[in-house]
Amino acid sequence: MCEHGHFPQAYFFAYTALEEISKSQFSADVFTGLRKEEEFEKFYRDHKNKITNVEWAHEDTTYRPKWIGPDRDDIEEIHPDKPLFNKRQSALYLDVDFNNNTVIKPWDVILEKDAKDIIHIVEVAFERIWEITNEEFGGGQIGTKGFMK
């Protein structure tokens, strides 16, 4: 999407991916007994709590440069902004600035950097989950218990 300039759509889908990752981790916590099923029912519909539940992914980007290839050492330090609910909304909807009598379009708000930042956060989240849960690395834990050890 980014290669075609669809930055608002990319931002929205990446934000949604983070919410889905968050829900999967929370549901694993219910399965392992760390959380109660009643908590999940409330959590499931709360956008802000879902993103708060995966803040670790944003924090981990500090330690995870992005590989840009082709050589192993071709990396780029990325310090992404936190995913924001208002940007998610801006990626989906037009807004109106009544003071200036103008329409604010998603591509006026969501820029290439925003889309690439949040995509990097999603990539780091998947990498960390894979590392923690993969038996090859001695993990095998599911949910946030694996991240708390």
Image (spheres, rainbow, N blue to C red):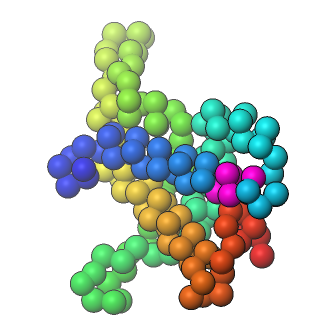
Which residue ends up furthest to the left in the rendered image? 4
Q: Where residue 40 sits in the image (x, y, percent)?
A: 72, 42
Residue 73 picture quarter: bottom left
Q: Assign the C terminus to one quadrant of the image.
A: bottom right
Q: Residue at x 73, y 56 (%)?
A: 31
Q: Residue at x 77, y 43 (%)?
A: 37
Residue 30 at x, y = what percent? 75, 52
Would you place residue 139 above or below residue 126 in this image? below
Horizontal and vertical percent for residue 98?
41, 10
Q: Looking at the image, is 69 positioned above or below residue 100? A: below
The answer to whether residue 141 is magenta is no
Q: Is residue 17 above or below residue 101?
A: below
User: In the picture, residue 3 is in which quadrant?
Assistant: bottom left
Total count of labels: 0
Residue depicted at 80% across the width and 51% down the height: 35
Q: In screen coordinates, is 7 left or right of 17?
A: left
- Secondary structure mostly taken by the magenta-highlighted segment of the chain: helix
Comparing 98 with 115, the one in front is 115
Q: Is any atom of residue 111 visible in this view? A: no
Q: 98 and 132: which one is in front?
A: 132
Horizontal side of 4 relative to 86 (left or right) equals: left
What range is drawn magenta here?
A: 25-30
Residue located at (57% from left, 79% from top):
134
